[in-house]
Image (cartoon, grey):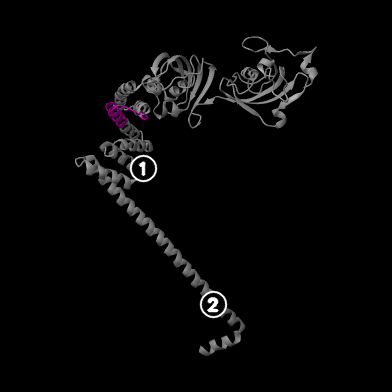
Amino acid sequence: MTAEEMKADGTPLEGADITPKQDGGVLKVIKREGTGTESPMIGDKVIVHYTGWLLDGTKFDSSVDRKDKFSFDLGKGEVIKAWDIAVATMKIEEICRVTCKPEYAYGSAGSPPKIPPNATLIFEIELFEFKGEDLTDDEDGGIIRRIHKKGEGYSKPNEGALVEIQLEGRHGERVFDKRELQFEIGEGENHDLPPGLEKTIQRMEKLEESVIYLKPSYGFGSAGKEKFQIPPDAELQYEVKLKSFEKAKESWEMNTDEKLEQSSIVKERGTQYFKEGKYKQATLQYKKIVSWLEHESGLSEEDDAKAKTLKLAAHLNLAMCHLKLKEYSQALENCNKALELDSSNEKGLFRRGEAHLAVNDFELARADFQKVIQLYPSNKAAKVQLVTCQQKIREQHEKEKKMYANMFQRLADKDSKSEADTLQTSGSHTTDAEMKDQEQNGVEDKSEVDTEA
């Protein structure tokens, strides 16, 4: 591209004004139409090629020349304003020319040494790919969010926040859920919301509108949802608007009395969830107690006793929930926390024994059950589990005995075979020598045979 192509009578080339304010700060000319109907949304990762020029035709940067495509998260301020605006209007395979005034580029500071202050820039951009933001902890693609409309401010709902949302859920082309509702974060299951949707809402800003794609493990899983006629292992799509929310008080915002009072409330709520078989929701409640009280210090003797009782109950109940969910390492962790508070706690020792047993640590499990029986002789369940442990240990010993016996037998067989092979080889060498002697003295040998005959 030459300076003549960029300028006509000293003014930038014309293009469509794509700025929200319609102030002419970003002008776009499509050089090659793209494919499809979708354009990138806020938060999408986009992949492009670009070349940039000053108005005098000086090329200052080019990913094309480097043969290295450039990627960034759209609408997150990672690039100049003009790019966030322009790329959001593009389609896959589109090539466009974008003219950016200084206030949408590098402003009065420029970007030394290549871009002077108050420079109007021209870019040619080609869009190759875009994809939504992965919100999963493991980045496994199970929750993809695409922001259709950015929200207000920076605050987001926290655990326990009261939120008001508008949603529409789809399975394939079918709308299965469309409503407005208000609920507390952590209780979405009670309102027939999948866990992935609730997790996403905690990442949204007020008045944000987003499209969310959920893989089965973050949707209704292998069970599906009979109420909505969702089959097992179904992928879902939701459109959600976060209309408003009221954040729950954080730990640092509460005094000791509030923490103790709220801990008692959520403990009862967690117990109710547990009775209903809603173990994940129960864990969320019990974890609140731990987060509120774990680092409290300088309490009065009475408050300290209350806090210890609540923390002990929380860890014991968390251990039970994790056992039900087959999350044994977390069960062990909470049992150990409980036993730090009360080293001879019956439930703590018993549940730790169950967790050890579940992961085949039979010796450790036996030790825990033996201690339970020693401290609480009437505990029949511990006696039953102790018998189970002893049986498992015997089976393990027998299995190891057979394994070692087989191993030694294989070694013995190998040694015997090696010895036999050695003898066979030695015998073979002797026969060869005798045959060679016979070949050398053929006449004499034949005469001896004849004589003997």
The secondary element bearing badge 2 is classed as helix
Q: Identify the residue shown where x is 75% and y is 24%.
A: 59
Q: What percent of the width, then of the height, locates residue 98?
A: 69, 18
Residue most extreme to the top: 22
Determine whether, in the image, residue 136 is placed left or right of residue 437: left
Which one is earlier in the sequence, the residue at label 2 or at label 1?
Answer: 1
Dividing the picture into quarters, in which one does residue 160 lie?
top left
Residue most extreme to the bottom: 451
The secondary element bearing badge 1 is classed as loop
| Rendered position, 337 above or below 418 | above
Magenta-colored span? 294-313
Viewer-nearest of discs 2 and 1: 1
Instruction: From the viewer's side, name the closer residue of 379 and 248.
Output: 248
Q: Which residue is mark 1?
A: 359
Q: Which residue is mark 2?
A: 431
| Rendered position, 384 above or below 257 | below
Q: Identify the residue shown where x is 49% and y is 23%.
A: 213
Q: Amino acid at mark 1?
A: Val
Q: Identify the residue shown where x is 28% and y is 49%.
A: 391
Mark 1: give few (<14), some (14-19) or many (20+) Cα within 10 Å. Answer: few
Dividing the picture into quarters, in which one does residue 101 lie?
top right
Residue 173 included in the magenta stretch of the image: no
Could you tell me if residue 104 is visible in this image?
Answer: yes
